[in-house]
Image (cartoon, helix red, strand yellow):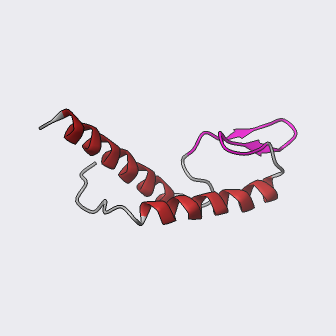
């Protein structure tokens, strides 16, 4: 297997992990979330925001990631 093929396999495995994390999350995906003392939430993309606003933006971000992932066939990738 070439180095490029190994790299591609690694990327596909990572994308499958992201997809699975999004599919099993009920409110938040498995991201790096920080809840501050004032109740605001942030992640590596947005925040800090009040909980309700953060959840709204988080749903948008999740939907965007899911749209991107739907363009990649990950069914044959083994975790």
Where residue 79 appears, x then y in whole percent? 28, 48
Taking the magenta stretch, the answer to whether it contains residue 46 is yes
User: What secondary structure is the magenta-colored segment mainly?
Assistant: loop
Count all numbered tags in the image, as a single digit.
0
Looking at the image, residue 33 sits to the left or right of residue 5; the answer is: right
State the residue at coordinates (60%, 39%).
32
18 horizontally vs 45: left or right:
left
- Examine the rendered structure and indicate whether residue 45 appears above or below residue 58: above
Residue 3, horizontal then vertical, whole percent: 20, 33
Q: In the rendered view, does 61 fall on the left or right side of 5?
A: right
Depth order, front residue of 9/16:
9
Residue 67 appears left or right of 15 = right
Which residue occupies 77% across, 44% down? Answer: 47
Q: Is residue 23 above or below residue 15?
A: below
> Residue 64, how many percent across, how many down?
57, 62
Q: Position of residue 26 (x, y in %)?
A: 58, 61
Quarter where residue 62 is shown: bottom right
Q: Does residue 48 show up magenta in the picture?
A: no
Residue at 40%, 65% (x, y): give it: 71
Residue drawn at 80 percent across, 59 percent down: 52
Residue at the far right: name it: 38
| Range covered by the magenta-colored residues | 31-47
Of all residues shown, which one is farthest toward the left? 1
Image quarter in which the N terminus is found: top left
């Amino acid at each position: 297997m070439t180095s490029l093929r190994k790299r591609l396999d690694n990327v596909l495995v990572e994308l499958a992990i992201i997809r699975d994390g999004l599919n099993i999350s009920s409110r938040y995906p498995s991201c790096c979330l920080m809840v501050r003392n004032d109740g605001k939430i942030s992640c590596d993309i947005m925040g800090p925001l009040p909980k309700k606003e953060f959840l709204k933006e988080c749903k948008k971000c999740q939907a965007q990631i899911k749209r991107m992932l739907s363009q990649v066939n990950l069914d044959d990738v083994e975790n």
